[in-house]
Image (cartoon, coloured by chain):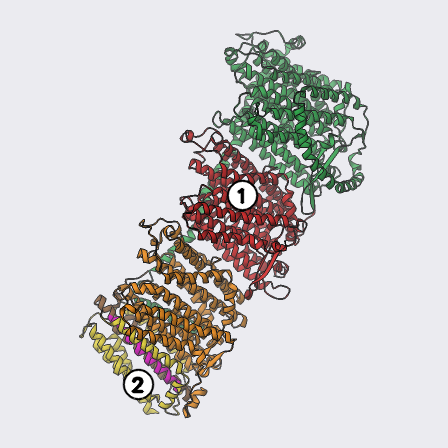
Amino acid sequence: MLAAAQAATDFVTPKLDYAALAPEMILTGVIVVVLLLDLFLDETQKYVIPSIAGFGILTAAFPLVFLAVQGDDVRSMVGGAYVSDDFALVFKALFLGTGYVVLLMSNRYIDEGDYYKGEYYVMLLSSLLGMVVMSSSRDLISIFVALELLSIPAYLLAGWRKRDLKSNEASLKYYLLGVLSSGVMLYGMSLIFGAAGTTVLEDISAQLVSVPQLDKVIAIGIFFVVVGFAFKVSAVPFHFWAPDTYEGAPTPVTAFLSVASKAAGFVALLQLVFIAFLSQGDTWAPLFWVLAALTMTVGNLVALRQTNIVRMLAYSSVAQAGYILVPFAVAGDELRAVQSAQTAAIVYLLIYSAMNLGAFAIVLAVARKTRSGEISSFGGLFQYAPGLTVVMTVFLASLAGVPPAGGWFAKFAVFRSVLDAGTGWAVALGVIAAVNSVVAAFYYFNVAREMWINPVPDEDRTPIRVPAALTTALGLTVAVVLVIGVFPGLFADLGNAASLGR
Amino acid sequence: MSGANVAFGVLAAVMAVSAIRVVTTKNVVHAALYLVLVLAGVAGIFILLAAEFLAIVQILVYIGAIVVLFLFGIMLTRAPIGRAPDLDNDQRAIGAVVAMFLFGVLGWILYDGFGDTQLQLRDVGRSGDVGASIFSTFVVPFEVISVLLLAALVGAVVIARRD
Amino acid sequence: MYLMQFLVLAAFLFCVGVYGVLVRKNAVLVLMSIELILNSVNINLVALGVYRGYDQAIVGQVFSLFVIAVAAAEVGIGLAIVLLIYRNRASIDLSEVDLMKG
Amino acid sequence: MVLQNIWVIPAITASSFVLILLFGRRLPNKGAEFGLMALTMTFALASIGAAQWVGRPADLEVEPASTIKSAEAHDEEGGDEDHGNKSDKGHAGEGAKEHAGEGAKEHAEEQDEGGHGAEGTVAEAGEGDEDHGGGHEAEPIRRPVDRRWAWFQTGDVKVQAGTHADGLAMAMLFVVSLISLLVHVFSFSYMHGDERFTHYYAALSLFTTGMFVLVTASNTLQALFGWELMGLCSFMLIGHWWDRDGNKNSSAALKAFFTTRTGDVGLLVGISILFFAAGQTFDIETTNRAALTGQIGSGVLLAAAAALLVAVIGKSAQFPLHTWLPDAMAGPTPVSALIHAATMVVAGVYLVARLYGVFWVAFDIGGGGINPVAVVGAVTILIAAALAFVQADIKKVLAYSTVSQLGFMIMALGVGAWTAGIFHLFTHAFFKACLFLGAGSISHSGSHHSFDMVKDMGGLKDKMPWTFRTFLVATAALAGVPPLAGFWSKDEILLGAGKNGYGLFMVVGLIGAFMTAAYMTRCVYLTFFGEPRGAAAHHHPHESPPLIVVPLQVLAVLSVFAGLLNAPFFGELFGKWTSNSTVLGAGIAHHEFSLVAAALSIAVAFGGIATGYAYYWKGFRVGSLRHDRGPTGMLYRLLVRKYYLDDLYEGFIVRGIREPVARAAYWTNQKVIDAVVNGAGIAARGIARFVYEIIDQRGIDAAVNGAGIASSETGGLLRYIQTGRVQQYAALMLGAAGVFALALALL
Amino acid sequence: MNWFDDWALTLAVFLPMVGVAVLALIPRANEDLHKLVALVTSGATLAVGVGILTRFDYSRSRMPQFEVDRGWIDVINSRYHVFVDGISLPLLALSMLITVLCVIYSWNHFPEPHNPKAFLILMLVLETGMNGTFVAEDLILFFVFFELVLLPMYFMIGVWGGENRQYASIKFFLYTLFGSALMILSFLALFFLAPNTAGQNTFDIPELVAAGASIPRSTQILIFAGLFMGFAIKVPMFPFHTWLPDAHTEAPTVGSVILAAVLLKLGTYGFIRIALPILPEAAEAWAPWIGGLAVIGIIYGALGCLAQRDMKRLIAFSSVAHMGYVMLGISTLTDYGVNAAVFGMVAHGLITGMLFFLAGSIHERYHTRELARLGGILKQAPHLGWILGFCAFASLGLPGLAGFWGEFPAILSAYSPAEALDEGLFRIYMVVAAIGTVLAAGYLLWMFQRTAFGLPKEEFSDAHIHDVHGPEWIAWTPLLVLIVVLGIFPNLLFGITDDAVGVVTQAFARVGG
């Protein structure tokens, strides 16, 4: 506003903090480099592209370390529309890490299939850039643009297996529903913009209180904005795309969607809810309550009946989103509850990312041999791939919330936020979550049972050869899951530090 | 401001009818043409709201580019150029109910919030201010959107090309 | 002029767009309907910006510009996806695209 | 002092058990050595202990119940002092125990040869002492010898293990060790060649240990140990031939354990109640004192006593839980002798005698009239005696006889004739052991392992003279022929019942005595007289080997003389030796020997015998039954002189009893009581199956599974929403959005 | 040996994990090495346990010993706080012993599918979980260990189990998971509602014990409900027991042994360590219900046993009954009761563990556990038969053997429960529980008769049946010896537990005698 007002008379060059923007800039650079290399490199030399992309991601993560070590100062730019704080750093790190793991997972997959390699990495990196930008965006326009940047490549990636009808369909469904929901979200944003008279989140929070006569408009605005991101995080009833898309998309992309894209949705929700709409708890708390309850329950119940592992994981990720929504529902306007809700959501996201990625990595590894996505194809895995079985079991246990795999701490954090709120509604939701986690255990352990107990379906016991990159990915994720499980303190700190709005 | 009101009335009527035709017509090409009318109407509305720059962009980008894209799309997918009986699926009733329900809810809420608010156009928005704003406050999204367009371009080519 | 009239027009376009998305079988027509929705958003943004004063009118316009740009990109890739579908299925009837369900 | 160290006695038999188990199989006599040595030692020790007890100065003044209170405070102080010393003593004891164990073993080996001689002298010495120690009816009694060790601690209560040596305990030790020793000897020949000979001896040792533990226990918990240990061993011994006759033998073992265990519920409950009622202690003396001084509320006391009575009924095979005892005949005969004479079944009687203060106060035994203990005893006497008439199996006759005699003991305790009850226990042990071992001898050498008197016996008196003689003596003792042992003890019971205001029970006792005499006569007739039948005719019966006969002779001698211990002419020594503070505190009246009562009981006994004789020897002159000259002239002539009762007996009493009443009783026993017991088992199984199959598997489990299925089905239904058609998804999303929006707007 | 005092518990808990790591690195083919490593690891752990036993100060058994208290998850103020006292020491020792014996027992009969590596790894992981649970003094730490045992057991049942293993393992898993979900809720409620003296929220059990009483009664009751569900399912109490027979029936022998001997104790231990001391008022309110369910469980379990045709299932049902005694003891809230409960836990661990070993060995020899098909074991394998008989008698609570001390004091304590409880009601419980002992005798002896007595059935009359062999002797002897020794010298255990139990029950005044 100040800037804009001055601009009316005289253009002032914005002060950009290039140190804070370093990750974004490096990533952009990498995108360009990869694109150019793809153009100029010989077909036989293109194997370097993933390495360069991976190297680029790690390089982009480097400034984060620097920024984190620098101290806890909040680097705010362009009138508070773009901020680099602990929250942003943590999530940027998460996204880059996730991106790196997905890259490792994709490596051989893309090589062996008939895909456009260079462009694949461009898409992946672009989407990643969108997410990184999302972590710092503190204004409606930035959020919108970041959302689109992370979505559009994702729509395309879902259809990357061009000759596969399922992949096409996945892409189409994802695209159509995605665009529709971003339309709804935009409509909501326009209403919020109208009511608050600003697009910067910090200011929206203050402004909304001053226009009580617009409460209904604001409520609808908030709701529509939430719808846009509820779609992204695949909350019921905006989840319909997820199972179909996950099933159809190439598996590394599915992993990416289910983890990074979902996390990005939550990042946006966190920023919007806990900065912009903080004062409007009456509106969004019940909304999230219903969303959370529906999401957990429907996700888990439908997952019970799945026979395809990816589809099962899709519904599982729907249900997991429900757990992450729980803290939103119970964060009242009491500071402590808000704090604890954010911590819970953040911690859950961190852990969820690791475990879900890991699970998909296993699916990928197993599918290399079985060429099937059916749960029954995991039969007797233990007999010929004990390592994978054990690791998968760790991930499943984590998803189900069984210590010492990390998942328990995520659930724990959620329950903690529920009790921190302490209201009747909160506890009711906690009970729903508890019941759901039991239901969930059933289908997770159905897979475990398949692997450990059931016979090998086709009696083919040739061992699975896991490529090095995939092994690295598995190693990383399983290490994270176990470390969190045993030393959750580390991550709890992270979650605490990363909370917004202090 | 009766002139503006009249202009709005005309524009709104044309847009409403055209919009309805876009979603009801049995001819695919007609739909595209009705869409042009709606988009042009939107440009007119922008002018009424003193946003000339935006109006021009609207015409250039939408009518000049997007509608053409649509027409290419119609052509490439060999859609029936004449009247086609089954352009709609079987959820017409549901669609109508949902749409009208939404419209009712939105209308009521908007009326509840902005029922008697007058619009005062004090000044015509200058393009220069728009530019300054883009390059100061919104410079990050601006840069980001360039990457977006690049990615969309590359991606669309990869997906759409025959191989 | 009342703010309402713009908002209601936008809301109307939005709902018509919604109807189109729900009802049209042809994928290209669905994309057109989505354009209706995005345009309604633009009207909203500009009108509400004006309602909020000059500075906000500019912000509203900027927002609209971004929406237009994104819309262009979206239509572009949307059509690419539709073409992809068409090439593999020789049809862009959305109600036939239901390989995956349950 | 043996009295202070009577823990050695169970310790010896326990180590014998362990040694037999560990080394038995490798020894020439398969482990019987250990058993015999151990029992010889324990018998010697018990005899020495008894002698020491008798020689102990009687210096403890016992005031009647009402004045005990003041003395008690004093006692408790003393008790506390004891606590202080105890830990030291305990340690010393433990240390000594190891040495003693070693020593005992060596000692036993040394004594191996001369065991018999030593035993004899010690026993004689003991008897000699008894005469001296008798003295006059001095009011003071002997101070019991207590020994305590810390056992365990829970809460602020330190539970102590300990031994309590007094007259009752010593008498029991003496009897038990003696009977057990004889059974050991007897078994050596009887069980020769049995495939589980070693196991058998191990179990015998453990069985005896159980009884020793019970007898020497100073607290109820320890008593429970012994009590259950016997249950275990009875299971092992009754089921000794578990591989024969299908499940019959093992089922009998099961039944024995299970039935007594049912009674044990009462013991557990009773002990628990008394523990708290007596101020959180298991100590028997303290408990008795607390009961006698009225510290325990009458309701609580009644509950405890009732619970204990249930235990007694189970263990001592009282009506209506007596059915296991006849079945328990499935075990080897020496075991039956041991069970019936000295261990197991008398444990119940012993328990009542030990906790007499509790029973006395709870049931107001001193008040006369009627009380549960006496009723249980009395009913059992009649029921069991009637049953004994119709048995064909000699062991079953004896078994019912035991039940009936246990009834006498319980009734004695119930009517306040404490000394008489215990004395009957004492004497009964000898002649009943003699009878059982005799029956064993018959089956071993006379009837080719059959116990059926009707089919496989008859006319054995000449073929097995010593068995016959000893059996006859024991029968006479059981029947109450003076001056044999049974006469004195039974007479005292009847006297006590009459004098203590339990007239009705005296009448019952007389009837019981009459019946006892009659059925034992029948038994003797069928076994030894008449024509040989079945196995007795075809398998060349002969006298048993010495190892079997000698115990019979020893027991027969004891059956003759044991009664004199409490005979009035000898100063009623037994009563003086066994009297203790509980009994005196209860204020039990002592009754002078009454000639009238004695005459009455003599009359009844001879009446019974005569009736039997008349019926079997004279009544059926037809056919092959030829009447014979009596074994002892006196008995024969007395029987003949009562001949005029023959018609009466045959016409009314015997027919009356034998035909309808006994049949009815047996029928009731088999069809009702046994059926109830068996039926309870069947019903329990039925209920169990119902509970398991219907409630558990279909109810609770199904509810759980049902919840799972329901959620899975819901999941299945929800899947239908996911139609795969993108526009339906959109419709659902937007529809939901509309509904949400409206809801939010309205709120 | 200060070093030992500081590290003993950590070693006891995590040494098995070292073994797991080593095992994981050894190729699967090298079976003998696997067995050796597992034996050495569990043996070393047991050695640590012996060290703890020798260095434990028995005169101060109510005090925490070998205590370690380090920061762990600072954000929620959860700490790595472990110690042993008189209550946890016996259970810790039991857990260590049982694991070693199980390794030995498995020596040359690993269940099918043959995979010693995985099997041993699971066993060692289980040990870590069990040991950890018994020493954890922080609710979160407790929870982590408590749950850690879930998975290995799930796989043990699921992979090496019988025909119905899938159903059984899933059932086991879901039941326990459901319980622990509610349990963690209660833990959190405690965390928030009972700040320590410094006003800080805490998961530290001793601190919560001090602070718990400040929670209002009605809230306590609710929190207790959550704890109750968590622990009661693990115990398991009627009517949450239905997972147990299935799990036991299907589990491999070693799994059953560990499950019965140690895992079930986690629940009862939780009651004693957490539920009672922290929420005394709620415990008083709940005790009559717990006691009621306990005695129902006693009778119900016994009836369930009588209806069984499968030997192992029968033993499993007997666990329901026996744990009923333990819970009855706990529900009295008295010294006697809780002492009895701890004793009962150890005794049940030894005896039922032994019974499951036997059932496994019998199954291995006859390839059936059907009572109707068995018989005459005493003829063919007399040692096996007599050991079975011995254990049956121990299990039915014969005085002089360990089982008695779990049963009788529990019955005894019910006569005089804590002051706040209804005496009359508990006396009824006492009588019912006493009747349960009869039924116990009934089903155990019935089983013994059917299997051991008589002659072998025709189908096995020619079969060559091994009597007890080497590894079995080695694995069983310590258990058998302990059963006798503890039966005769109960103070070996009561002496350790009593003082510490006093700490638990001090909140509940006892009615005097």
Q: Position of residue D631 (x, y in %)?
A: 63, 9
Colour red, chain: E
Colour brown, chain: C
Q: Can you say whether A415 is above or below D126 in the image?
A: below
- Identify which amino acid the numbered label 2 is placed on: Val
Q: Quadrant of residue D554?
A: top right
- Identify which amino acid the numbered label 1 is placed on: Ala
Q: Is residue C43 visible?
A: no
Shade representing chain D: green
Q: Is residue D629 visible?
A: yes
Q: Position of residue E366 (x, y in %)?
A: 43, 35
How far apart are labels 1 and 2 at the CA level?
Answer: 83 Å
Instruction: Please say if the residues under marks 1 and 2 sit with CB atoms less than 8 Å apart.
Output: no
Letter of the chain that mark 2 sits on in the rendering: B
Which of discs 1 and 2 lies nearer the camera? The answer is: 2
Q: Position of residue D247 (x, y in %)?
A: 48, 28
Q: Which mark is residue E321?
A: 1
Q: Main secondary structure of the magenta part?
A: helix
Is E291 positioned to the left or the right of B162 in the image?
right
Letter of the chain that mark 1 sits on in the rendering: E
- Range of magenta residues: C58-83
Q: Position of residue A263 (x, y in %)?
A: 42, 69
- Quarter placement of the C terminus of chain E: top right
Q: Number of numbered discs present?
A: 2
* Front-most of residues E56 and C69: E56
Is E484 positioned to the left or the right of A167 in the image?
right
Q: Can you say whether C11 is above or below A452 in the image?
A: below
